[in-house]
Image: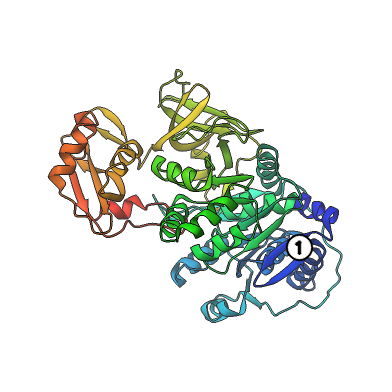
Amino acid sequence: MLDLIDQASKYLHNTAIVADGHTRTYEALLQQSSSLAALVLDDESDLRERRVAYMVTPGFDYVMVQWGIWRAGGIAVPLCLTHPLPSLKYVLEDTDASTIVVSPQYENILKDLAAQKGIRLIVLQNELAALEKVMPSILPERRAMILYTSGTTSLPKGVVTTHNNLQAQITSLVKAWEWSSDDAILNVLPLHHVHGIVNVNCCALYSGASCRFLPAFNAAAIFDIFTRGQVNLFMAVPTIYYKLIAHYESLSADEQRNVSAAMKKFRLMVSGSAALPVTIMEKWRKISGHVLLERYGMTEIGMAIGNPYDGERKAGFVGMPLPGVHIRLVDDDFHDVKMGESGEVLVKGENVFSEYWNRQEETKNSFSADGWFKTGDVAICENGYYRIMGRNSIDIIKSGGYKISALEIEEILRTNPRIKDCAVVGLENEEWGELVAAAIVAKENQSIDINMIDSWMRERMPAYRIPRHYKVVDELPRNTMGKVVKNDLKKIF
């Protein structure tokens, strides 16, 4: 991502990163990432796409390490800070990582595994010694990063993006969302996913903006940063907005007024990585004055579709194709569907990943014969705006000859005053193909009568969409990005 690093030279004295009470400039970021690159290179001149994994605390060190790997010619492999050792081992073995860079607090987690596998382990200290080395020349076609899919439907796959792919993903969003060096954003997202890495970090730093980090999610700390006027952009997943709304409702009237007044001054607020419930969107609008900009993307493509920065943002819709991205909706035979009909989302553009790591057959099968990436997501286009119906394999339920969107049923269930959250899945059934089943989380101090919920749903939806099975649960199984893991959810039925 060397265009990103070249851009930094334009903003040497701008604040790049604010974290742990420290403010660091772009000049410091360039100096320290150069030293990290020299350290990783050791006595070599170019890593030549060797994989360098890193388990580093969000903040200056994280970005410095990522940039250093890229400058040394390596492929960056970020590790999840909360994954158990077997999951980390899976990524290290799958990528055949040659080096691991860790913050000191993660050394004990990985040192035995690194020794066992013969992987070089670098433990970061407070400040890297200044090391000078001629950096290799990196072509845009080179592989830059491997991110792993959520693994909601199968074993996680390593998604390989080139420097050119990342450049396309970043510049598309910078143009669409009008980033500038005057911007400041708070990053509270996991940094082993495209949302936190590209949409927040890379877009901010490409633009000469500043990026602020929190050590862990803390609703009170987030609102404190908001009220101090320290940021003017915010991006999060629906689960985070839900938690912030809950915290807001616990504040005094004066505190609520202060938070709301501060948020009204923001330039942009974005939601993604999971479907945004319309109820959450409306509650957030009332307290912040912002209609959240919902967009659609995935690990393999970065962002592809987004509601407009200037223009109408439609609840329940993810918007229109982003600059440089081409979209088609097709049927099972890969013929374009008619306007208003549902079809699988196909994507083409420089933003689309190059391959699944060491999975040639899966890479080949994920593209159509004419080079369109098959997302597996089903959508409808209405008046130029796309609405995601769900994932073909988990959110589109095929029952009695009907194709039913689990997301639409979830939206209706969430409007019930007794229901806090829910998720809908399809259960295999010999007679019907699949049966609709709903897991429900009750609001505090509320009881759920399944028969009453069933009657309530029958007043609002056609009979073939009504869940045949309900289960009341304490919480829904989620991954680190807040997505419900529906294959895990099916097991409770």
- Report crowding for label 1: few under 14, some 14 to 19, many 20 or more residues within 10 A (C-alpha): many
Count of number-bearing discs: 1
Q: What is the image's colouring?
A: rainbow
- Residue at the farthest top position: 338
Three-letter residue code for mark 1: Ala
Q: Which residue is mark 1?
A: 72
- Residue at the farthest front position: 254
Q: Nearer the viewer, residue 405 or 234?
A: 234
Image location of residue 235, percent across then percent down: 56, 50
Q: Is residue 427 above or below residue 157?
A: above
**Would you say 369 lies left or right of 180 here?**
left
Q: Residue at x 24, y 31 (%)?
A: 461
Q: Is residue 442 above or below residue 102?
A: above
**Would you say 408 lies left or right of 220 here?**
left
**Would you say 48 lies left or right of 330 here?**
right
**Would you say 3 lies left or right of 337 here?**
right
Image location of residue 22, percent across then percent down: 71, 71
- Residue at the farthest left position: 451
Q: Nearer the viewer, residue 406 or 151?
A: 406
Q: Quadrant of residue 102?
A: bottom right
Q: Is residue 204 above or below residue 221?
A: above
Q: Nearer the viewer, residue 111 or 477?
A: 477
Q: Quadrant of residue 136?
A: bottom right
SS class of the residue under badge 1? loop
Residue 319 visible (yes or no): yes
Residue 194 visible (yes or no): no
Image location of residue 150, percent across then percent down: 46, 54
Q: Residue at x 82, y 67 (%)?
A: 31
Image location of residue 107, percent across then percent down: 57, 79
